[in-house]
Amino acid sequence: MTETYNSAVLNLAVTGIHDLTESNKQHKGVRTPAQESHFLCSWMVDSLKTKRFSKLVAEDLTQWIRLGRSQGAGAQLKQLLERIVLQYQDAKTAKLGEALDGLLADFSQKSWLVVTDTPLSSKLKLDGDGQSSVVICAEQMKNHRKDAELLKPIALYVRGDENVLAEIALQHGLLISQANKKTTLIKHHKTYLIIPQNQHLSLCLLARLK
């Protein structure tokens, strides 16, 4: 069975939290956030050197090590791993079309402007007086789904609180790509992608811990 990025990054995060917890048990007194960050940064360095985890997450480890070395406790490595577990552990692999409908319904309930009936082929400007909004091409909504399933990637053009987007996605078991400003077709919006079976090739948008 071919390993996916999702399983690789979830395994890394779960293992990191477990190893930190076990190390904390052997440590005299309560570790400070700076001490926990130092442990995890060293742990990531060792994991990268020994190739403990899949090469699919090697770039992530390299980036997080750099972050830990430059920011110390400010890198919030423990919280990062906890957020990964939160977002990935219940991610769906089926009925993502149905999950998308639930996501859009929640946006409507939050008084976001939701537009899914307009074909998009060139850059447009949405008149919404600054209102939070999500736009999806009508052709993608029709042709990239079948019944409850997602057949091809769908782009969401979003203007609004990114954490709200991540939280609602989490509630529906959807993984959403990181934002891309360069590919947007709607002015003042960012592009986010949902992918069949939630199988992204890099870290998705993560909700904050509550």
Image: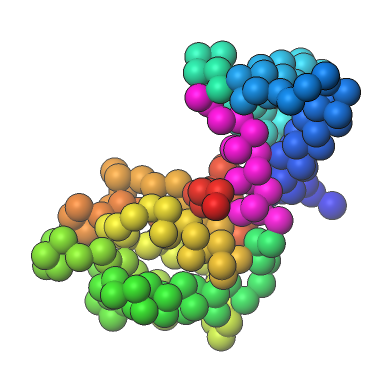
Q: Is residue 126 visible?
A: no
Work out whether 57 lies above or below 159.
above
Residue 77 drawn in magenta: yes
What segment carries the magenta color?
A: 74-89
Residue positioned most to the bottom: 147
Query: At which x and y percent is residue 111?
Result: 29, 75
At horizontal 74% and vertical 25% (from top left) the residue drawn is 30
Residue 76 drawn in magenta: yes
Query: At which x and y percent is residue 155?
Result: 40, 61
Name the chief secondary structure element in magenta: helix
At horizontal 55% and vertical 18% (from top left) the residue drawn is 72
Q: How many marks?
A: 0
Query: At which x and y percent is residue 181?
Result: 30, 45
Q: Nearer the viewer, residue 50 or 102?
A: 102
Q: Nearer the viewer, residue 88 or 185?
A: 88
At horizontal 64% and vertical 33% (from top left) the residue drawn is 78
At horizontal 79% and vertical 49% (from top left) the residue drawn is 2
**Residue 143 as seen in the image, left or right of residue 206:** left
Query: At which x and y percent is residue 188?
Result: 20, 52
**Residue 119 as seen in the image, left or right of residue 28:** left
Q: Is residue 17 visible?
A: yes
Q: Quadrant of residue 63?
A: top right
- What's the colour scheme? rainbow
